[in-house]
């Protein structure tokens, strides 16, 4: 998946703002169809940014926020898909009212998107503020969008990564713990609340002991084996705080009906796997088998029947 990185530089002058916008839209680095503007026209982003600052009399101080979303060379992804990912990312609630100019750069081995945010909100006049929690929410949502497009997980500036096969190897092939990991990961991005999460895990056959008085969550699989959330990899993705942040994001991007549809699709896919009698592992570890696309064609038919297209992310409020 992509790596989000904020770029710190001198950005206290209007000339610096003009330079960075000229840089990200440089035709030697990108094409017209790979550029985008959220709450602004990418072809006159500087004027749009400046007008907002002038209206609210906030032309001094920090002029813009600059960050990138980078993809590793081994990611099988096209510039067009990366542009679609960027289009979805700027729909996050944290960008509401802010003007964002962005463009996919194709001049390096690793494809990447530059985002430049006006520090003054067009609707409220308030200046941009970003907490560590908001940054983590952005990274989590970026991971979710990328996962939808089948990209591998990348971590850190070095672009080191761990894919499904490597994680499975760590667990010595199919294992109950890897199956639990997949269950929690999938429910993290379907549930809209803690109660939804627990109920969905129950439907998959897992018991969840999530108490405010205890630091960790304890999961019990259908065979009675227990595992705490701190044992899932990477642990920072499965803390109580990380899960609750994901639930809030899910509320922003889908309603109850869409969430329920996704859960029904997953349960139907699990039943398809279990019906394959010659696949013993499929009966024991259906989510692990689904990761290998054992029933890809059948699953696509289920999606169509539900009127839901995950590949295009057609939830009403995405």
Image (cartoon, helix red, strand yellow):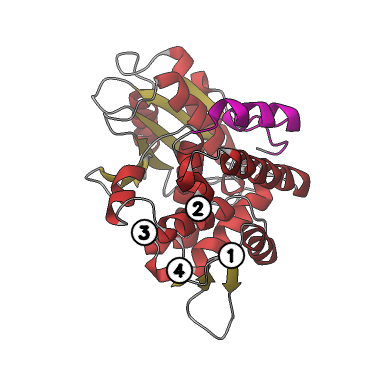
Question: Is 214 colored magenta in this rendering?
Answer: no
Mark seen at residue 284 = 2
Q: CA distance from mark 3 to mark 1?
A: 20 Å
Viewport quadrant of the C terminus:
top right
Q: For the image shown, how many numbered marks are present on the structure?
A: 4
Which residue: 38% across, 32% down?
114
What residue does disc 4 label?
A: 229
Q: Earlier in the sequence, mark 3 or mark 4?
A: 4
Query: Few, some or many C-alpha atoms within 10 Å of disc 1 (few <14, some 14-19, many ≥20)?
Result: many
Residue 104 in the image, given as x and y percentages of width and height: 39, 25
Residue 167 in the image, given as x and y percentages of width and height: 32, 51
* Residue 47 visible to an observer of this rendering: no
Which of the two residues, 206 or 161, is positioned nearer the viewer here? 206
Mark seen at residue 117 = none
Q: Secondary structure at mark 2?
A: helix
Q: CA distance from mark 3 to mark 4?
A: 10 Å
Q: Earlier in the sequence, mark 2 or mark 4?
A: 4
80 is higher (above) or lower (below) than 168: above
What residue does disc 1 label?
A: 206
Which residue: 40% across, 28% down?
21
Residue 218 in the image, given as x and y percentages of width and height: 51, 74
Query: Few, some or many C-alpha atoms within 10 Å of disc 3 (few <14, some 14-19, many ≥20)?
Result: few
Q: CA distance from mark 2 to mark 3?
A: 24 Å
Q: Earlier in the sequence, mark 2 or mark 3?
A: 3
Please state if 118 lies on the left or on the right of 163 as rendered: right
Q: Earlier in the sequence, mark 1 or mark 2?
A: 1
Please state if 107 lies on the left or on the right of 81 as rendered: left
Name the image quarter holding residue 273: top right
């Amino acid at each position: 998946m992509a790596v989000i990185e904020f770029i710190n530089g001198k950005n206290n002058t209007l000339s610096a703002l003009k330079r960075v916008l000229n840089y990200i839209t440089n035709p030697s680095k990108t094409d017209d169809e790979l550029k985008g503007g959220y709450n602004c026209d990418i072809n006159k982003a500087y004027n749009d940014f400046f007008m907002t600052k002038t209206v609210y009399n906030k032309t001094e101080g920090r002029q813009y926020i600059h960050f990138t979303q980078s993809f590793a060379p081994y990611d099988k992804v096209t510039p067009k898909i990366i542009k679609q990912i960027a289009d979805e990312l700027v729909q996050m609630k944290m960008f509401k009212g802010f003007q964002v100019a962005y463009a996919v750069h194709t001049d390096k081995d690793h494809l990447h998107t530059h985002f430049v945010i006006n520090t003054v909100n067009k609707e409220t006049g308030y200046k941009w503020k970003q907490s560590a929690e908001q940054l983590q929410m952005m990274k989590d949502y970026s991971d979710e969008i990328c996962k939808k497009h089948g990209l591998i997980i990348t971590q850190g500036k070095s672009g080191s990564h761990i894919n499904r096969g490597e994680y499975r190897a760590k667990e010595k092939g199919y294992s109950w713990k890897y199956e639990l990991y997949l269950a929690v990961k999938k429910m993290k991005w379907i549930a809209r609340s803690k109660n939804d999460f627990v109920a969905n895990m129950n439907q998959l056959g897992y018991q969840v002991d999530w108490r405010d008085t205890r630091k960790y969550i304890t999961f019990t699989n259908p065979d009675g084996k227990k595992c705490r959330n701190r044992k899932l990899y990477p642990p920072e993705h499965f803390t109580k705080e990380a899960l609750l942040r994901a639930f809030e994001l899910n509320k922003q991007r889908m309603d109850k009906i869409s969430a329920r549809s996704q859960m029904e699709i997953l349960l139907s896919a699990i039943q398809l796997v279990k019906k394959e009698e010659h696949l013993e592992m499929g009966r024991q570890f259906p989510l692990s088998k689904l990761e290998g696309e054992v029933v890809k064609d059948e699953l696509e038919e289920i999606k169509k029947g539900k009127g839901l297209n995950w590949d295009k992310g057609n939830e009403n409020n995405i």
